[in-house]
Amino acid sequence: MYYTKDTILFLNGKFIKAVDAHSDLYSQTLHYGMGAFEGIRAYLTMNGVKIFKAYEHFERLKKSCALVGIPFDYETEELIQIAYLLLEKNNLSDAYIRPLVYCGPNMTLTKPTEVYLMMCAWEWDKYHGDKMLKLCISSYQRPNPNSLKIEAKVTGHYVNSILATSEAKVRGYDEALMLDMDGYIAQAPGANFFVERNGVLYTPALGHILPGTTRQLVFNICQALDIPVKEKNIKPEELEDADSAFLCGTATEIAGIESIDAKPFKKDWFDSFGASIQEAYKCQVREKSFSYVII
């Protein structure tokens, strides 16, 4: 699904075939989850192939490493150049790019000294496709921000996400919606959450969530389209009389939510703020004008 015998990836300074790539089985990343990664999309735009928000994503990768003490000395512009070469070598235009910073062999619980970079890419549709999603409130909470660096995109953190999504699937839902340790809405396992209520769009405040790049883009789109948007602590019961909701993220893009715990939202999706933002998002990543999107 992710590579063939001809796929090229970047590994430790070289472009090599994916089938020839190897990693150390004693890696601290493999054993303890000490690694950092990003998810980035490239699109075929009206001006050629463009990596969307490349600078912001690679800056966050470097920040994630710094937050957990992983030494990583690549410059952002160098990372962007590698990503474009990777797309070119694999003849990709609409693609998902995955840089991974991983650590060398270390069986101790100390900061790594040997650090490596892998970057790969593949064609990947929206994470949830185009369907309206059915979510459930998860029994798994987002981690306590005093227990780890919640704003870092670290490999080990995603065990929490896998447990939540897997539980939701077993229960017959498409995805989970997780609460924080105080019982407020936090986020989906791999995406941020927005809810429309009485003419205003709300999203959980920072603190217990990953501050997503797409989340910030939604704020920018809302400003351009004159949609009121606010950060606040959202109680689960506030969703019961909400008008609409959606998830956002690089892999997810903008995904409308049909229901939460089998309770549908009041508005038809195409009449919601989310639908307008979804259309504007599509235009922005393709470098088209979205001035025609009317609220």
Image (tube, rainbow, N blue to C red):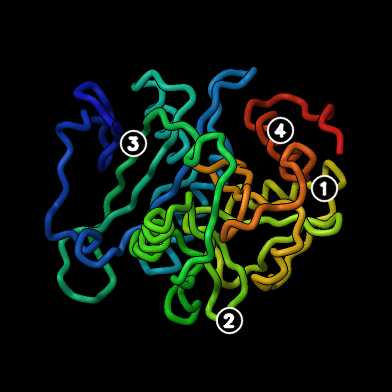
Q: Nearer the viewer, residue 141 or 285?
A: 141
Q: Nearer the viewer, residue 266 or 192?
A: 266
Q: Secondary structure at mark 2?
A: loop
Work out whether 204 lies above or below 92.
below
Which label belongs to residue 279?
4
Q: Amino acid at mark 3?
A: Cys
Q: Amino acid at mark 1?
A: Gln
Q: How far apart are the alpha carbons under marks 4 and 2?
A: 34 Å
Which label belongs to residue 120?
3
Residue 59 coordinates in the image, percent (x, y): 52, 51
Q: Is residue 12 visible?
A: yes
**Of marks 3 and 2, the one in the foreground:** 2
The residue where tag 2 is placed is 182
Residue 207 coordinates in the image, percent (x, y): 59, 72
CA neighbours of label 1 inside 10 A, class few (<14), some (14 to 19), many (20+): few
Which residue is painted at 47% across and 58% down in the image? 189
Contact between marks 3 and 2 (CB within 8 A): the answer is: no
Q: Secondary structure at mark 1?
A: helix
Sequence-first disc among 4 and 2: 2
Q: Is residue 71 visible?
A: no
